[in-house]
Amino acid sequence: MIYLVIVSFVWAFSFGLIGNTLAGLSPAWMAWIRLALSALVFLPFVRRLPWKSALALFGTGAVQFGLMYLAYMTSFRYLKSHEVALFTVMTPILVAVLSDLFGRKFRPFNFLAASLAVGGAAIIKWAELESSAPLVGFLLVQASNLCFAAGQLAYRAIMARLPQPVPDHRVFFWLHFGGFAVLTPMALPLALADAPPAPSLLQWATLAYLGVVASGICFFLWNRGARLVSTGRLAVMNNLKIPVGVAVSLLFFHESANLYTLLAGALLIGVALLPVRKS
């Protein structure tokens, strides 16, 4: 679970960076650049796989990374960064429900853990919601949540079915390449236009950090960690970035937040770990 904790701390910074530093850039183009960089990180480690396995990983990456990023980064056009964070609280429910749906069984402990996590994250973020978010922004975040939840579970299943065990870093290029490929038809025309996106030096540096670290290394650690924990605990960990994000805002960006609300929500998320059973 340490992988999931580390990634949650790193991702806690991403909401503010995307919503503020990268404001004004095309969402599809930004996601395309991020995934191009993350694919390059794992290109030296790629190993040939059976074509069906490689295609399955490619498709998983197209959904979990490509379509997820398109919806997620577009949502910042309609929502403030803290509103985007708030609406990601549905991801644990989706992880638990999709897992039960794929397994054709209902695990009440997983659903309870995920529900408590949603409640804890909502407690933390609800007090900071200052405006009514447009419905389109809300729906985009939910589409992003669905893609990310489905991708995590698909990756676990694909890796478990490989004919021979393969280290995660040997296959991860296929996921990033899938995400990059699905965005290419939307992003490439922008890159080749008469007036292509022209990020500032700070924006290029931010994109490089997000591509190499937040997307490349952290997606790898997250999916690796997703294979090592139960489905219920994975569902809960999908919301750890929210209380961590609040702490980052307090300590590093000097934003205001209700300390009692933070403690109550963090406690509830912690309690959500207790009823989880391995599955």
Image (tube, grey):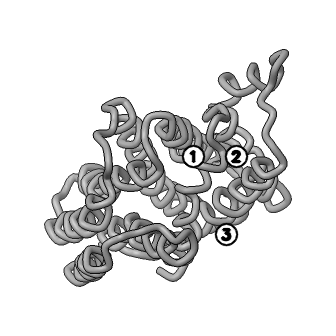
Residue 274 appears anywhere in the view: yes
* Mark 3 crowdedness (10 Å alpha carbons): few <14, some 14-19, many ≥20: few
Left of 19 or right of it: where is 80? Answer: left
Say which quarter of the image contains residue 177. top right
- Rendered view: 128 above or below 29: below
User: Which residue position is annotated with label 1?
Assistant: 65
The answer to whether marks 1 and 2 mark residues whose Cβ atoms lie closer than 8 Å is yes
For the C terminus, which image quadrant? Answer: bottom left
Percent of width and height locating residue 54: 65, 46
User: Which residue position is annotated with label 2?
Assistant: 35
- 3 vs 1, front mark: 1
Identify the amino acid type marked 1.
Phe
Residue 224 appears anywhere in the view: no
- Rendered view: 48 above or below 192: below
User: Which residue position is annotated with label 3?
Assistant: 167
Percent of width and height locating residue 238: 40, 64
Question: Residue at image x 42%, y 49%?
Answer: 84
Distance between the Cα atoms at labels 1 and 2?
Answer: 8 Å
* Mark 2 crowdedness (10 Å alpha carbons): few <14, some 14-19, many ≥20: many
